[in-house]
Amino acid sequence: MKVKKLIVFGMTLLVCFSSCNRHPSFSTSQEALDGCKEQLSSLKEKKEVSIEELSKLTASWLEVQDSAYSVFSKDSSLSLKSPMAVAYFLVSDSIRKEISRLAFSQPRTLKDVMYLKQHTAMQREKLQKDAIYQDAVKFYEKLDEYPIYPDLASTLKAYSKLLGSAKGFQQGEELMKFIAMEDKCFRSLMKYLSAVDTEQLQKLTAATTQVFDGLYSSVGNLTDEVNDRTMLYLSMRFNRRIIQNAQACHEDVKAGKRLSVVQRANYRWKLIQPFMAIDDYSAAVLTPSQAETLLSLSDELPKLLEKLDSKRQVSSKENNLTGMLADYFMKSYLSSIL
């Protein structure tokens, strides 16, 4: 997972910089610095903001920041110690503090965190108009038409066999075929999730992670059209997977299925995972349906966690927990993008 995040972060920076170079908002370094100062002045005037306004303010600063970087990179007179650069660093640091202040000017929820992620994903609009992205959406939608395995035993047998035979993929078609076969296994596993032995689940998770972490590493070594396409498909698979995982837990909990103490702990993690694991690039490649599912799940999360509490503690404690998680994820996300 760490490897994936590093790769995606690097890709996102490259995309942002290239975008800024095509569409700079400023003509000179001084103009860029003045634009940043205007952003800071506007932020200081605000006492508190809704999550919608916070998202707009954050997205606006990210756009200004990228445009400023574009101009600075072309200015041969600038160095890290030049007065212009020092002034920019001071202003940008102040802006980060102001956005963080406004982020906690009101109590925030996990739904707010997810909303912020979805509306500050810098490349979301551009990516979703791209033909390659649209092809990827169709590819994954097609996978939903494949029937799952009829029972847990056949699911586990097929899954173990598939992962055991996985080797290096020489062509894109091989990877797509493997993703499709693994997706069928995973969707089947989610159907029977409450009946899966914890040890067996851990083995499957470890084997799957080993296969795909290797792919993330190899894809991240090069930057070209093929690797960018592969990273897009892998990132969309990642989104699909953690959302399906959370949905399966959601359905089992609402159905009142009997779960062991260990299973309850695992279910809590799976329900919370999307709010922690989805970064700005992952948010950018969410489909509209997935984005809506995550917002809906965030509304129900406190009650789901309450039901998973074997001691049936009062809901106020669960609400406090989700509040603390929202604060933590909000801080973590802002620190990663600002």
Image: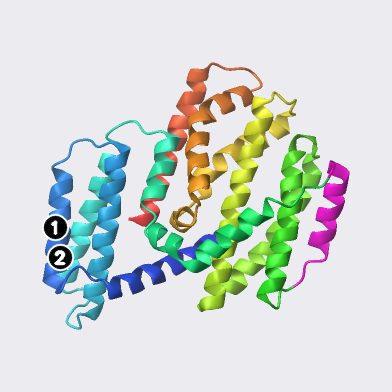
Rendered view: 164 above or below 250: below
The crowd level at tag 1 (other Cα within 10 Å; few <14, some 14-19, many 20+) is some
Which scheme is used to colour this image of the protein? Answer: rainbow
Q: Is residue 139 toward the left or the right of residue 65 in the image?
A: right
Picture quadrant where residue 229 is located = bottom right
Of the 4 image quadrants, the one containing the C terminus is bottom left
Residue at x-position 56% and y-position 43%:
273
Residue at x-position 63% and y-position 50%:
241
The crowd level at tag 2 (other Cα within 10 Å; few <14, some 14-19, many 20+) is many
Observer-nearest of 282 and 337: 282
Q: Is residue 200 toward the left or the right of residue 289 in the image?
A: right
Q: Which residues are magenta?
A: 150-167
- Amino acid on which disc 2 is placed: Leu
The alpha-carbon separation of the residues under discs 2 and 1 comes to 6 Å
Rendered view: 265 above or below 171: above
Check if residue 7 falls in the magenta segment.
no
Q: Is residue 297 visible?
A: yes
According to the picture, the residue beneath numbered tag 2 turns out to be 33
Mark 2, secondary structure of its residue: helix
* Residue 150 % position (x, y): 84, 43
Residue at x-position 51% and y-position 24%:
318
Q: Could you tell me what secondary structure mostly forms the magenta stretch?
A: helix
- Amino acid on which disc 1 is placed: Lys
* Residue 7 % position (x, y): 51, 67
Rendered view: 120 above or below 88: above
Q: Is residue 120 toward the left or the right of residue 149 in the image?
A: left
Query: Looking at the image, which residue sits at the far bottom?
Result: 76
According to the picture, the residue beneath numbered tag 1 turns out to be 37
Of the 4 image quadrants, the one containing the N terminus is bottom right
Rendered view: 14 above or below 42: below
